[in-house]
Amino acid sequence: MQTISNKTSAAVADSLPVLAGAALAVSAVGAVLALTDLTSPLRPPFTLFFLIAAPASAVAAGLRGMEPLGRLVASTAGAVALNLLVAQAMLATHMWSVRGGVAAIAGLSALLFLLALVRRPGGRTARRQTL
C-alpha cells in the first residue's frame, strides 16, 4: 500500500510545475485579451482568473514561512483585498476602466514579486549551505 501512496504523491508532485505553467498561460491570455480589448467568449473568465491569480501568487511569494493551507487562504484574501483597493481607488478618482484595472493589478503584482525577491537574501542556496 505504501508503494501506491508514494507513487501517487510523486505523480502529484511531478504535475505541479505543469499546472503552474498552465495557470500562467491562462492568466497571460486573460491579461492580453483585456488589455487589447479583443472580443472573445474566453475574455471574462480568463481575465477574472488573471485578476485573482496574479496578486495571489505575488502575495504567496512573500509568505514563504507559512503552512500551505494558511498561505493559500492568506494569499487569496490578499488578492481580493488588492483588487478591491484598486477598484476603490479608480472609482474614487473617476478613472475606472477595465484596461486600467488590469494594468494596475499587473503592476502591483510585479512590484510585490520584486519585493519578495529582494527581501529574501540568498534564497535556497544560502540555506542549503548552512545545513
Image: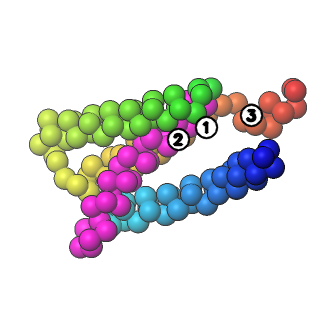
15 relative to 59, above or below? below
Packing grade of label 3 (10 A; few <14, some 14-19, many >=20) is few
**5 or 98, nearer to the observer:** 5
What's the distance in space between the residues labelled 2 and 3, CA to CA? 16 Å
Residue placed under numbered mark 1 in the picture: 117
Instruction: Give the numbered dot on residue 59.
Output: none
What's the distance in space between the residues labelled 3 and 1, CA to CA? 9 Å
**Disc 3 residue type?**
Gly
- Looking at the image, residue 25 sits to the left or right of residue 46; the answer is right
Q: Which residues are magenta?
A: 37-64
Q: Are marks 1 and 2 in contact (CB under 8 Å)?
A: yes
The location of residue 45, given as percent across then percent down, is 31, 60
Residue placed under numbered mark 3 in the picture: 122
Quadrant of the rendering where the C terminus is positioned: top right
Question: Which secondary structure, mark 3?
Answer: loop
Asked if residue 56 is among those painted magenta in the image, a careful observer would answer yes
Residue placed under numbered mark 2 in the picture: 113
Packing grade of label 2 (10 A; few <14, some 14-19, many >=20) is many
